[in-house]
Image: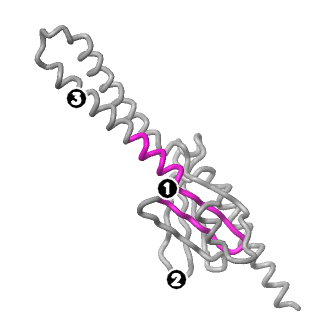
């Protein structure tokens, strides 16, 4: 059971799960891979120069190990960020949680959502991600970048808002 499931109130059900798009870790993958390849090159240089003719061998080995560790750290942080972001639409709220050590949560009641804005760049449209801005009554806009399938996310939020509104109309008509 995830963090958001533990936050559900009695009678509340998860209707849709969204997440960050994999492209959020594209830049860290490139940087991490570059650092790892540079580290491997240093270690190979150290291994080839071990005949004792060069005094730079310890520096090459230390640099190679440091670069490998840095590359691995960059990749690990990006993967954790991707995995630690949860976005759900329930029958009553939109819940968004990001982070592990430093957690940020946003909870918007469906009844208080005024609009869901979606912005997609050309590359975002081609790859299936976009920026979503949730605007609540009397609150500041909450912006989330690189959400996977942002139009489906908006459709699900609007669907739950409509269902909540229809339910209230039926109760008021009784």
Residue 3 at x, y percent in the picture: 58, 64
SS state under label 1: strand
Foreground of the two, 156 or 122 = 156
In the shown orientation, is residue 29 left or right of residue 117? Answer: left
Q: Earlier in the sequence, mark 3 or mark 2?
A: 3
Q: Which residues are magenta?
A: 74-99
Provide residue 51's location: percent of width, then percent of height: 18, 8
Residue at the extreme right of the image, as rendered: 174
Q: Residue at x 47, y 43 (%)?
A: 25
Q: Residue at x 47, y 66 (%)?
A: 104
Residue at image position (59%, 68%) is 95
Quickly name the residue at label 1.
145
3 and 2 marks in contact (CB < 8 Å): no
* Marks 3/2: CA–CA distance: 55 Å
Q: Nearer the viewer, residue 75 or 43?
A: 43
- Identify whether 69 is placed above or below 84: above
Which residue is rendered at x = 42% and y = 60% of the image?
A: 101
Q: Quadrant of the N terminus?
A: bottom right
Residue 19 in the image: state x and y as whole percent: 59, 53
Pointer 2: what residue?
138
Q: Earlier in the sequence, mark 1 or mark 2?
A: 2
Residue annotated with mark 3:
62
Occupied quadrant, residue 7? bottom right
Magenta segment: does it hold 97? Answer: yes
């Amino acid at each position: 059971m995830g963090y958001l499931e533990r936050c559900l109130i009695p009678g509340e059900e998860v209707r849709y799960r969204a997440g960050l798009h994999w492209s959020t870790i594209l830049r860290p993958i490139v940087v991490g891979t570059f650092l790892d390849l540079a580290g491997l090159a240093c270690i190979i240089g150290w291994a080839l120069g071990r005949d004792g003719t060069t005094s730079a061998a310890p520096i090459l080995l230390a640099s190679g190990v440091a670069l490998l560790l840095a590359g691995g750290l960059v990749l690990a942080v990006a993967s954790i960020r991707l995995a630690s972001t949860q976005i759900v639409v329930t029958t009553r709220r939109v819940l968004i949680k990001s982070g592990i050590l430093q957690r940020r949560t946003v909870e918007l009641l469906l009844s208080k959502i005024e609009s869901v804005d979606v912005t997609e760049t050309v590359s975002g449209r081609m790859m299936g991600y976009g920026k979503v801005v949730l605007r609540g009554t009397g609150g500041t806009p909450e912006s989330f970048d690189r959400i996977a399938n942002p139009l489906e996310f908006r459709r699900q939020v609007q669907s739950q808002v409509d269902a909540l509104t229809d339910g209230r109309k039926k109760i008021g008509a009784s």
